[in-house]
Amino acid sequence: MATAAAYGSLSFEQQIQFFQGKYPSIDYESIRGAAHDRAFISAGAHRIDLVQDLFMVIARAIREGMTLQEFQPDYEAVLDHYGWEPNGGRNWRASVIYHTNLRTSYAAGRYQQLQEVKDRRPYWGYQHSDAVLHPREQHLAWNNLVIHADDPWWLSHYPPNGWGCQCTVIAYNLRDLNRMGKNGPDKAPAIKLRKITFKDAELEVPEGIDPGWDYAPGGSDIQQQIQRILEKAEGLPEDLAEILTAELMENLGSGN
């Protein structure tokens, strides 16, 4: 018997709203990183009506909490209607499109929830999932790290951080940290970049992150604000840069 569709929990309001706020696009080559917050794409699908229908069946699956098995007939019906055979075969592509959109929309909904309680729970803990059969070494190394929610590290390391990644984030307050034996949040690990070629472009991607996954789903607006803060601090003496960044981050966190 099929189990309930879930990635941490059944579909919830913020998750559904995030996905329904996307627009279908056939511009697969140019949609990267945080642009996925706004656009829905499917590799190899070059007809906008096809992408629109794929979007609709995924939206239904998220909205109704469908399992992969329940989603697949709707997906197959779209492929049959357009006579489209995706690379990799139908079953594999159904699994990829289902799990990728389920997990990123879940992460985006969680991101919104975490922001809403950030004044009370300002520390985020990275949680690796034991359900992954072949865990990434770097993701295991980040497990149980607790870093301040406003640390720029989360701009590129908020999960999921790659294809099949099931890592999540949990919010904590200082009392939670004390119970964990911590006096405060951990220092964010240094970000080491590696150069790769992806979609015919030379990119620098953090170690442990798959190409195109170095962004926080649902956090594009906040990411842009933080990036502007960091740009303002560039070129200032280190002590002044720290003061400016701290003040601007505090204002951002309070919504002022």
Image (cartoon, rainbow, N blue to C red):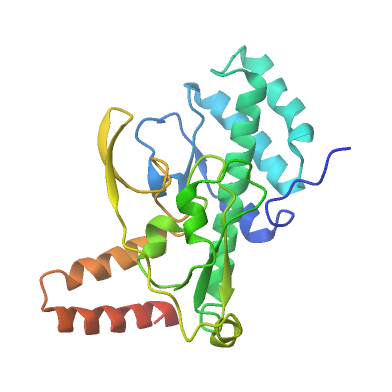
Residue 204: where, in percent of width, then height? 27, 44
Is 218 placed above or below 74 here?
below
Which image quadrant is residue 50 in? top right
> Who's the residue at 62% across and 55% down the image?
15
In-front residue for pair 1/22: 1
Which image quadrant is residue 233 in? bottom left
Residue 217: where, in percent of width, then height? 49, 54
In-front residue for pair 125/88: 125
* Quadrant of the snapshot with the C terminus: bottom left
Residue 115: where, in percent of width, then height? 52, 71
Residue 165 vs residue 6: left or right?
left
* Quadrant of the snapshot with the N terminus: top right
Asked whether residue 1 appears in the rendered view, the answer is: yes
Is 144 placed above or below 137 here?
below
> Who's the residue at 31% across and 58% down the image?
191
Is 151 placed above or below 55 here?
below
Asked whether residue 218 appears in the rendered view, the answer is: no
Residue 182 vs residue 53: left or right?
left
In-front residue for pair 167/86: 167
> Who's the residue at 57% across and 73% down the image?
171
Residue 170: where, in percent of width, then height? 59, 68
